[in-house]
Amino acid sequence: MATTAAHVARPSRIRLGMVGGGRGAFIGAVHRIAARIDDQYELVAGAFSSDPEKAAGSAADLGVARSYSSFAEMAAKEARRKDGIEAVAIVTPNHMHAPVALQFLKRGIHVICDKPLTATLPEAKKLAKAAQESGVVFALTHNYTGYPMIRQAREMVQAGILGDIRLVNVEYAQDWLAEPLENSGQKQADWRTDPARSGVGGSTGDIGTHAFNLANFVSGLTLQELSADLQSFVPGRRVDDNGHVLMRYTSGARGMLWCSQVASGCENGLKLRIYGTKAGIEWEQENPNYLWVTPLGAPRYRLSRGGAGTGDAAARVTRVPAGHPEGYLEGFANIYAEAARAIIARRDGVAMDAAVSFPGLKEGLQGVAFVDACVRSSGKNGAWTKLAL
């Protein structure tokens, strides 16, 4: 029997490839879950390891039919297929982000890259130029900007509810590297404390960039210069494991950033506080569904994800009713979903919805330049230093 309602077909899933993220890789699994949550991607190919046997084993574990022993082979062969990948997720150690991305960019394949953009600032500038010239969608998974209450905070700042921003205080404290874990052969610690693979920044590159990106995203401010004091508390460690950074913004606002991976008792203590002439806001990643607001001269109150008083920006990245926790994986998924909307718009040749928002090349360049400036400043006893953009 014919139906009177018109059927609107959903867009076909984006054919996704992955470089890195094989057996034993934490972040690869996170990306795969994030890509699946909204059912907009299908993982069809991968170069999951530089070891062909491990790559094939990982592909078999994941049910991925097309396994490659190198990212260069994958980029070349997938670009020639009619059913080749449309986008690639890059989940390698930092030093491989640039060479992998460049292979796919020159073939017009969209890129979703784990942060930071690259290990060095010259690489970041080269990659950004190549991505801009290719015209593809380039998303960087600074996943904390995908949290609904962070979107709420940003909307409130933009609406002027806080007034003129005066102070920004952000911190990201962990303790998992409080001891020389890298000496035990632990995979994640091993590459994150190796400057040849992580880049010159340790905690600054791994979690400091998240804190810096979050502060920028919500406040909308532009950094003018910084003064950094970086430490390597664990003997023999070649990259920083703790950093204190003072920040001066072009608007005249002031900021402080603390990142540490040796703060005993801290798990993933990402916290943001912003104070303006009319009000202040506070948010912490370990209680992500709540945003605290304190108007000047009035009682403090709490906004809840999906609850009364929240706006459109939070609502469009909220999946379940208030009271049900949403957090880390959903934040990642929101970045993947926003990137999917941009990719599908390119596929269909239509304008992207203006509400779509995800970190990209600009944020990636700023993050790498932030780490570079921190290292240079600390090396000069905290001299005030501008980002070399």
Image: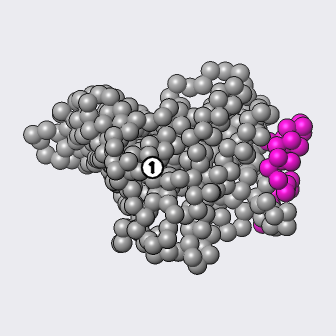
Q: Is residue 240 left or right of residue 275?
A: right
Which quadrant does the N terminus fall into? top right
Question: Would residue 128 be counted in the magenta stretch?
Answer: no
Residue 311 horizontal side relative to residue 13, left or right: left
Residue 39 in sight = no
Instruction: Please tell me which residue is depicted at 60% across the width and 25% down the height of the picture.
Output: 352
Q: Quadrant of residue 68?
A: bottom right
Q: Which residue lies furthest to the front in this view?
A: 380
In the rendered view, tell whether residue 106 sits above or below residue 376. Answer: above
Residue 306: percent from left, percent from top:
39, 46
Relative to 29, residue 95 above or below: above
Choose between 17 and 135: the one closer to the eye.
135
The reply to whether residue 362 is in sight is yes
Q: Image point 62% across, 75% down: which residue?
A: 185
181 shown above or below 127: below
Task: Report the span colored magenta.
Answer: 59-85
- Give coordinates of residue 138: x percent, y percent: 63, 36
According to the image, label 1 marks what residue?
Answer: 375
Judging depth in this view, the residue of 64 and 10 nearest the camera is: 64
**Along the line of sight, the residue nearer the viewer: 121 or 259:** 121
Residue that extends furthest to the left in the rendered view of this protein:
297
Q: Which of 280 and 179 is in front in this view?
A: 179
SS at circle 1: helix
Going 57% across and 34% down the picture, which residue do you hit? 361
